[in-house]
Amino acid sequence: MEDFIIAFQNAAKEIQELLKTSHTDYLSSTNSSGDTQLGIDIKADKIIEEKLLSLKSVYGVCSEEKSEAIYKNSGSYLIAYDPLDGSSIISSNLSVGSIFGIYKETFESKNLIAAAYIVYGPRLELIFASEELSYFIYDGDCWQRQPSIALNKNGKINSPGGTQKHWEAKHKALIDSFFQKGYRLRYSGGMVPDLHQILIKKGGLFSYPATLDAPKGKLRKLFEVFPFAFIYEKAGGMAIDGKNRLLELPVDGIHDTSPCFFGSEEEINEVRKTYE
Ligand code: AFP
């Protein structure tokens, strides 16, 4: 897995430079999920595609910006990635990220064997999870390994996604119940910094539920939901769609979405009580 870590670290440095110097204007094109694309989304996609396809062990890649996967002749790993998650908050200069899922032979949750994400913020950071979780910070010269991350049984952060107007009543009651217990609202609109914050602060809840306008949720299974489910479970947390473990869900096409809840044990048990 060392070659993947090096590829992600090299891509991270190039994309961080792009973010510092590129315009963040929207293009007239949309990606396969119907999101308007930025020029920088497409450049980041290309940087990552080249880095990954140059690895011997990689058989194919698919990304949020592509309508289909690209395959080579050899290798056994398939990588699904979101090259620049949080396009809509780049113009406000908030942190954004890249997310990766490494699958063995097929793009299915049961074959996810490693996952990673990069945070482009005031600092450049990489989290990589396979058997265990590794955390790196770039110091401007080298990637410095940090102590690993583990979630406590509960936390203090509530990170609720989606438009409240479209939440089901039971979801609104669940989110309110956390605020009544003293949880603080922390939500930037970028999945990477929002989930990273919960990991770094050792607990809390991130939710992106089924809504009246998006009954299957917004976040994509292969590029966003499964990789973060894998990372949260490795950190001692849990990840469910309300009832089921996210990493046991089937996939209906590369851009399939799911409602999702990531957090520490006690918060996820509360979610289960609401949704079961
Ligand atoms: P964009 O890439 O369009 O900015 O979407 C980001 C994202 O997929 C994810 O990073 C956020 O958690 C989620 O959307 C935020 O969505 P809401 O604004 O609907 O809460």
Image (spheres, rainbow, N blue to C red):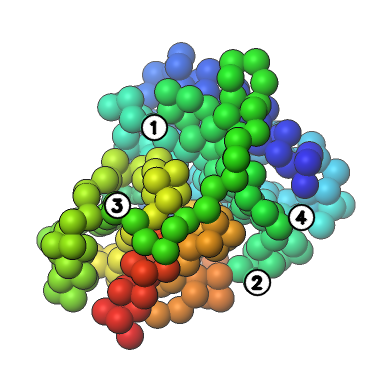
Question: Which of marks 1 and 4 precedes in the sequence?
Answer: 4
For residue 77, the mark is: 4
Look at discs 3 and 2 and give the one toward the viewer: 3
| Some atom of ligand 1 lies within 8 Å of the CB belonging to the residue at label 3 | no
Which amino acid type is shown beneath numbered disc 2?
Answer: Lys
| Some atom of ligand 1 lies within 8 Å of the CB belonging to the residue at label 2 | no
Secondary element under disc 2, as helix, strand or loop, is helix
Label 3 neighbour load within 10 Å: few <14, some 14-19, many 20+: many
Q: Position of residue 6 (x, y in %)?
A: 73, 34
Residue 59 shown left or right of residue 27 in the figure: right
For residue 95, the mark is: 1
Q: Which residue is mark 3?
A: 157
Secondary element under disc 1, as helix, strand or loop, is loop
Question: Which of marks 3 and 4 precedes in the sequence?
Answer: 4
Write the residue at 77% across / 47% down.
Answer: 1
Query: How far, Cα to Cα, is label 2 from label 4?
Result: 13 Å
Q: Position of residue 51 (x, y in %)?
A: 71, 34
Label 2 neighbour load within 10 Å: few <14, some 14-19, many 20+: some
Secondary element under disc 3, as helix, strand or loop, is strand
Question: Which of marks 3 and 1 precedes in the sequence?
Answer: 1
Quadrant of the snapshot with the C terminus: bottom left
Look at discs 4 and 3 and give the one toward the viewer: 3
Question: Which of marks 1 and 2 precedes in the sequence?
Answer: 1
Relative to 62, residue 144 above or below: above
Q: Are marks 2 and 1 in contact (CB under 8 Å)?
A: no
Which amino acid type is shown beneath numbered disc 4?
Answer: Tyr
Residue 93 shown left or right of residue 136 in the figure: left
Which amino acid type is shown beneath numbered disc 3?
Answer: Ile
Q: Which residue is mark 2?
A: 110
Query: How far, Cα to Cα, is label 4 from label 3?
Result: 35 Å
